[in-house]
Amino acid sequence: MRIILYYFILFGISQLALAEQKFELYKPGYIPEGFCDRGVELTLMRDSAILKNFVKGTCDLYVPPNVRKYKIQSSFKDRCGTKNYIAKRNYNGEIYTLKIIDHSNRFCEDFPPSKIIIIEEDSYGDSVEMHLPR
């Protein structure tokens, strides 16, 4: 028990909680309605991030999961407490980049568009941005 308490004191709860976190992300500004919501599930772990397409609700739409696993290359906190991750994956010889911006512990007074933002970019520079709804 003491070891866990010391860990919290030294590294904070967020480091221990990062063992695995899941988020449902949608296109910017989209608010899930519960009928036919399409999005991306982000599973964030210590050294990797997994993206998986999903559809929720009662509609008859099928969306292939298209599971993508990224290896986290670097992470850093900015001066406002935002945690930034850069992850990469190699698929058929092409490098894909995933940027994860975690504003969960942000303490600056400005208002970011979402607590969690991901930007998935292919080797040609085309990108898709997804947000955690408010």
Image (cartoon, rainbow, N blue to C red):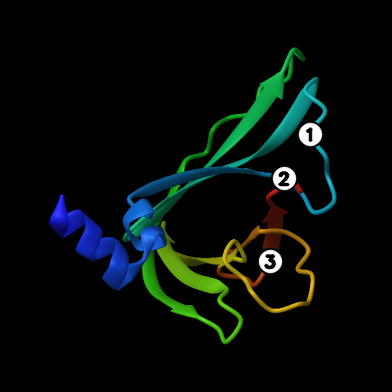
Report which quarter residue 123 is drawn in.
bottom right
Q: Which mark is residue 9?
A: none
Considering every residue shown, the one lying at the far bottom of the view is: 79
Mark positioned earlier in the residue sequence (1 or 3)? 1
The amino acid beneath tag 2 is: Tyr
Mark positioned earlier in the residue sequence (2 or 1)? 2
Please tell me which residue is depicted at 15% across the width and 56% down the height of the picture.
2
Q: Are marks 2 and 3 in contact (CB under 8 Å)?
A: no
Mark positioned earlier in the residue sequence (2 or 3)? 2
Q: Are marks 2 and 1 in contact (CB under 8 Å)?
A: yes
Label 2 and label 3: CA atoms lie apart by: 18 Å
Label 2 and label 1: CA atoms lie apart by: 8 Å
Expressed as whole percent of the image width and height from the top left, the position of residue 102 reads 57, 64
Provide the secondary structure element on which disc 3 rests. Answer: loop
Give the camera-side residue of 79 and 74.
79
The amino acid beneath tag 3 is: Asp
Residue 90 is left or right of residue 133, and the answer is left
Q: Nearer the viewer, mark 2 or mark 1?
A: 1
Q: Which mark is residue 32?
A: 1
Please tell me which residue is depicted at 75% across the width and 68% down the height of the picture.
112
Is residue 123 shown above or below 54? below
Is residue 26 shown above or below 119? above
Provide the secondary structure element on which disc 1 rests. Answer: loop
The residue singled out by tag 2 in the image is 26
Please tell me which residue is depicted at 78% across the width and 63% down the height of the picture.
113
Q: Which mark is residue 126?
A: 3
